[in-house]
Image (cartoon, rainbow, N blue to C red):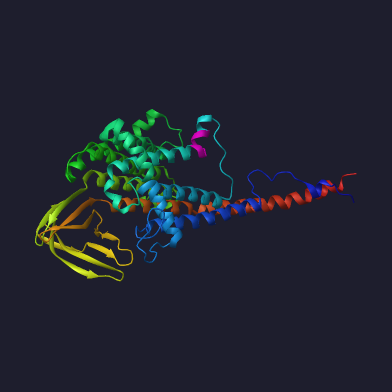
Amino acid sequence: MTYSLNTLTDASPPASGSRTGLARFAHETALVLGAVALVFWLLAIASHSSLDPAFSTSGDGGAIRNWGGRLGAWLADGSFFLLGYSVWWCIAAGVRAWLASLARWMRGDDPPPAPNTPASRWLHGRLAFWIGLAVLLTASTALEWSRLYRFEPRLPDHAGGALGYLIGPSAVKWLGFTGSGLFFVALMVPAVFLMGVGPIARWRKASLPELAVRLRWAFAASAITALLLPLAIGGWKPLVSLGLLLAFWIVATTLLNLRDRVKTTSGPSGLLQKLRMQSRSYYGMQLAHVGVAVFIIGVTLVTGFQAEQDVKMQTGDMVSVGGYDFRLKGIKEVDGPNYRAVRGEIEISRGGQALRTMYPEKRSYVASGNAMTETAIDTGIFRDLYISLGEPVGNNAWSVRVHYKPFVSWIWGGAVLMALGGGLAVSDRRYALAARKERLARASSRTETAPALATAATEEP
């Protein structure tokens, strides 16, 4: 019996659709390292403290407060220094990329083939993703610099970070305050509009007239709600109506898509049975879209209806902001573990009914001598209240800053819904079944190939 040398040195590529063990191991390693990096980055940013020593500050000399230690303090400080609070878009983009990679691993196959047309190939390529993220960060940081500058005391640098400070002043100079806001919002509008159209367009197979007929009621309901709701909240504003229009557009098209999906599902006639037949990946996609809408509502209403006042207050004085009354009941000195502070006692009431008492502080740290303001925060579903104690201004009076921010919790709620939607989508059982099928197919292919190679070897002269 003779054997061909090619039997031992065959270098032919594996069958189409299969992946080598080394490639799969590298993919799994990248997933693990990517998850660790994203979680560490998220924890570092969530626990950021301006009192920790980092790139932009020497700290107060006390213990590190960041959950990621000194490295986490530097990472969070550098992230906020560069992009401000817009860095959360990078977190969202990283989670999206990781979930897409996880879904690919669970399916056990290679990425789908690229479309044939050059335009489609570009839209589905990595370059389009990075360009889109760059445009989003440009618009977000510029808007943050011009609209959310009140958050600067919590950031290591300007609102919007270094990028916002680079772009924002030039945009305001050449386009004006209102024009720059409209311009940067317009950069985000096409992506949000297409987010509602995409799931209904049947992967770009539907014609424009058909889409217009199917979506006319969704657009009408969104437009009417966006026009009337600001009047009920606090007054009509163009940018507020535009933001609400985009948010309600996503919600309306999501509900329309769910209705069409249930209507076309074959099988049992009951509504609940048809709803249970839908896949996890479908519900995950819809939940993520609703999360985007919730996020937009939060950002829109905070920007449009937030209110603040800087006032001089003595004991017994009261100021009204956002429909709430703030009464200064007294000022006293307190000692902390490594600081001394002046603490204000401010009672919050609405309509004559006392709600709670808040305690803002002005701290002086013993080790470094640095003075820091400890803002008192009252968080709710529909509004957040912030009170900062400033400096004494004579005659037993103090400067006090009061903020009213409606729906700010919806910003974080939208991000949570997006993450939950992505997790629900990748947990779809079909992905695991597809991976199992591929493993069985590879094993079957190897079983069939081995006898064929042995037969071919015995037949060689």
Judge from the rendering whether residue 366 lies leftward or rightward of residue 102; answer left or right. Answer: left
Residue 167 visible in rendering: yes
Point 33% across, 34% down: residue:
170
Total marks shown come to 0
Q: Position of residue 152 (x, y in %)?
A: 30, 49
Residue at position x 52%, y 38% from top? 125
Residue 318 lies in quadrant: bottom left
Q: Position of residue 235 (x, y in %)?
A: 17, 41
The x and y percentages for residue 119 are 50, 30
Q: How far from the left and from the top, in percent, is residue 40?
A: 46, 58
Viewer-closest of 343 and 425:
343
Main SS of residues in magenta: helix
Task: From the viewer's perspective, tell me whether residue 371 is left or right of residue 13.
Answer: left
Q: Compared with residue 85, is residue 48 higher up or lower down, i.e. above or below?
A: below
Residue that appears at 22% across and 57% down: 388
Quadrant showing the C terminus: top right
Q: Which residues are magenta?
A: 121-127
100 in the magenta segment:
no
Q: Is residue 137 above or below residue 428?
A: above
Please say whether residue 88 is visible from this viewpoint: no
